[in-house]
Image (tube, helix red, strand yellow):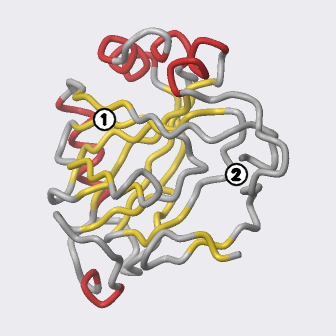
Amino acid sequence: MSADAARGLGWRIWRGRGKASASLKQRAALLAEAVPQIPGRVHELGRFEDRSVLQALQACLPEPLAAAVRPTFEWYGCRGAGFHTDSHYNAVLFGAWGLAGPERDILFAGADGLYLRCAAAGLVVFDPFVPHAVLDPDQARYDRGRYAGAAANVFLGFEVGLTAPACAAFGIGPAEPGAFAIGSATAVNAETGAFVR
C-alpha cells in the first residue's frame, strides 16, 4: 500500500502510442544532449504547460484517464535507470511518453517481470509506487556498467489524477489492514526491483 495515501497499489498498466508533433520531438531530441552522463538515474529536465500537448495526450488516452490528465508536464531523461519508485507522486498515476532515444524497455518488477518497449511515441500509464526500471531490451536486471556512456532516452512525464473512475480502472482501492507500506523512504534494490525491508 501507499504509506502517504493509505491506498492499495495499482498493478494494472495502460500502454499505447501517441502522435507527437514535429516540434515536440525536436525539443526532446535537443534535451537528449543535455541528459547528464550519470547512468542509472532519471534526471528532471524542466516543467512546462502546453495546451497542444494536453490535447494530444487526451486524444490518445482512454476515458477515464483522458479526463484526469493534469495540465503541467515535466521532461525526464536517463541513460538507463535502475529500479525505483516515484512515491513522491502522491494521489496520481504517472505517465511517460517516450519521445527520443534508443529502444528500451520499462520493466515493472512486481508485475511478474512485465516488459513494455518504450520506443519513440510509446505511452505508458502506471502507479508510481510500483518499482520500475528503464533497461535495454530483454534485460531482467539493472547493471550500471552497461549504461556508462550509453545514449539517453527522453520522456515527457505527465500525471493522471486519482479520480474514482481512474482508481477503478487501475484496481486501486483502500489499503488492506497490515499491508506493507511504501513511502518516500522505502528502499528498492536498484538491480532487481525488490523492496528492501
Q: How many marks?
A: 2
Which quadrant would residue 106 be assigned to in this image? bottom left
Image quadrant in which the C terminus is located: bottom right
Query: Which residue is found at the position 50% from the left and 40% from the top?
Result: 11
Query: Which residue is found at the position 43% from the left and 79% from the top?
Result: 191
Q: Where is residue 22 drawn, in percent x and y?
A: 17, 31
Residues 167 and 93: in front is 167
Q: Is residue 182 left or right of residue 12?
A: right
Residues 89 and 37: in front is 89
Q: Is residue 58 left or right of residue 149?
A: right
Label 2's element? loop
How many other residues sit within 10 Å of disc 1, few (<14), some (14-19) or many (≥20)? many
Work out whether 76 lies above or below 58.
below
How many other residues sit within 10 Å of disc 2, few (<14), some (14-19) or many (≥20)? few
Amino acid type, residue under disc 2 in the picture: His
Which quadrant would residue 86 be assigned to in this image? bottom right
Disc 1 and disc 2: Cα gap in Å? 21 Å
Return the disc, 1 or 2, that comes first in the chain's sequence: 2
Q: Is residue 133 left or right of residue 64?
A: left
Q: Is residue 107 left or right of residue 173?
A: left
Amino acid type, residue under disc 1 in the picture: Leu
* Disc assigned to residue 88: 2
Query: Which residue is found at the position 70% from the left and 51% from the top?
Result: 88
User: Residue at label 1?
Assistant: 123
**Do the residues bearing badges 1 and 2 touch, measured as CB atoms within 8 Å?**
no
Which quadrant would residue 174 be assigned to in this image? top right
Work out whether 23 lies above or below 3.
above
* Disc assigned to residue 23: none
Residues 128 and 24: in front is 128
